[in-house]
Amino acid sequence: MTSAMNNLVIPVGEEGRARALSEFLAKLLELGVVDAMVVPVMPVPGVITYLMAKDPELIRQRAEPFASVMPVNGASPVARAVSKKPRGRIGVLLKPCEIRALVELVKLKQAEADNLFVIGIDCVGTVDREEYKEAYSDTSRLQFRDACRVCLNPNPPDTAFPGINIGHIGLDDESGLLASLSPELDPGIAGVIEELGFERGDVLAGKRQGVLATLKEERNDAYREFLQKAHAELDGEGIEGVAKLLAACIGCRNCRVACPVCYCRECIFDGDVFDYETRQILGRAGRKGGLKIPGETLLYHLTRMNHMSLSCVACGMCEDACPVNIKLFQLFAGVARRTQGLLQYVPGRSQEDQLPFTTFREDELEPR
Amino acid sequence: MDFEPRIVAFLCNWCTYTGADLAGVSRIQYPSNIRPIRVMCSGSVDPMYILKALLDGADGVLVGGCHQGDCHYVNGNYKARRRLAVLREVLDELGIGSERVWFKFISASEGALFAETVREMVDSLKALGPNPAKAVWFT
């Protein structure tokens, strides 16, 4: 797709790439390309949050577009903010997994895409929230989160939204940042951006593609190794093996809240369906000799895998949110790979791909 | 005593449930291991229902729907087929195994097929043995 993209170079000055990109984003707001811009900012040292900016100066001073931390998958707050069609155009700067989650939310009718102007940005990985807080000024020594370490999509999808992608993988400050304008970008907007006078970036785009390909190969290996380890932990134990991995679950449902694509406003597990009467609990306890309370831990997690794994974008937010450190990403990654593979669905790739549970082919699967 | 598997069956009102009824009125003999639950459509069977039965120790779960093109609600059976296929992947990936979950298209006129399906399923579950979830209390 890169060839069809309109590639430009955003030069990086002495203040570094974060300020250079912030300046570009502030310009888009100033020039009226967007009426507001959602960017990650650092309100207090070491803490990153999203800001819906109306004042370009706030972006210039506080935006942290390269912050290597993801306290929340940005698709969630953005979808909430635009669930009812907003007036004016809203720009959002999002990482690849956030964009892919946003595509899923649009398809699930939880976000309104028409008035969004999506700016994707390369992301090689994010680190643990607490570790980031300690060492935010230099995170190069920190290890990426598991989900990022094995992430196969460090680049934003080209086909998801008619916006801009910011590329920096394999590019140093001297060469500048790559801004790739989607071929479907509104010509008016493209015109405004081209008037900023950036140089053509096709050479840069080629350089980035090469490094990206190598990175993806490495990630593929890491991913395979990761899944092998995951399988080894479950090895041959059946239902008991899964129950052991989830034994520490306290039923807080944080994983569901943090999951960008688990969207139901009212979840079956919050209703009174599972408020059993004592005699029912006693009956089940009698059959098994005893019963963990609160129960239905496996039912909850397996149901979520059935309902949501097709749209899982592998952001790992579930695992970050778990207060008892259950390896949820590890469980979800393997399951999602299989369910998505079965129905050949790539979540977040395009708004055109239909959600697999809303469609079917007459001649597929079993029984026939 | 021999192991007698317990099967929870979600049967579509329009096809498989009626097929089961036909097996009955035709006096076709089949094992009594099955506990039918009538649902309006196989497409209304959330994977959660199946998981609930399995986790609580049911030895098998059978979902019965209409044949292609026969769904009373146009395409519920196709959607059920996708859900069941996804459920199988989840169970297999986690090492739980999906062989206890069966999905069949059985029409209202196929009483004999219904009886045969139950016979086959009971044989297969007897070979598998009791559901290990029966003994896992920390689910």
Image: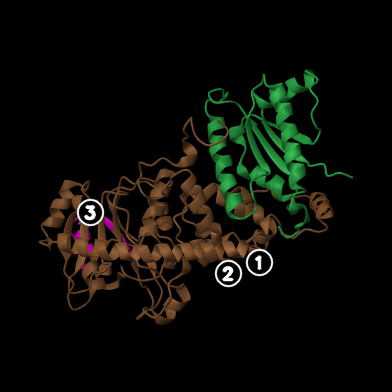
Chain colours: A brown, B green
Query: In this figure, which residue is indicated by the disc labeled 3?
Result: A2
Query: Residue at the location (64% across, 62% down)?
Result: A246
Label 3 to label 1: alpha-carbon separation: 46 Å
Query: In this figure, which residue is indicated by the disc labeled 1?
Result: A248
Q: Residue B124 occupies which quadrant of the picture?
A: top right
Q: Chain of mark 2?
A: A
Q: Indicate the position of residue B68 as horizontal and vertical percent values.
A: 54, 26
Q: Which callout, 2 or 1, points at the residue further toward the start of the chain?
A: 1
Query: Residue at the location (77% across, 35% down)?
Result: B34
- Secondary structure under the numbered disc 1 in the rendered image: loop
Quarter of the image that includes the C terminus of chain A: top right
Q: Chain of mark 3?
A: A
The kind of residue tagged 2 is Asn
Q: Which callout, 3 or 1, points at the residue further toward the start of the chain?
A: 3
Q: Indicate the position of residue A62 as horizontal and vertical percent values.
A: 30, 72
- Crowd tier of the residue under label 2, counting other residues whose Cα lies within 10 Å: few below 14, some 14–19, many 20 or above: few
Q: In the rendered structure, find residue A325 and report the number of the disc placed on it.
A: 2
Say whether mark 1 and mark 3 are on the same chain: yes
Q: In the rendered structure, find residue B7 and report the number of the disc placed on it.
A: none
Count every numbered label the image shows and give the total: 3
The kind of residue tagged 3 is Thr
Label 2 to label 3: alpha-carbon separation: 40 Å
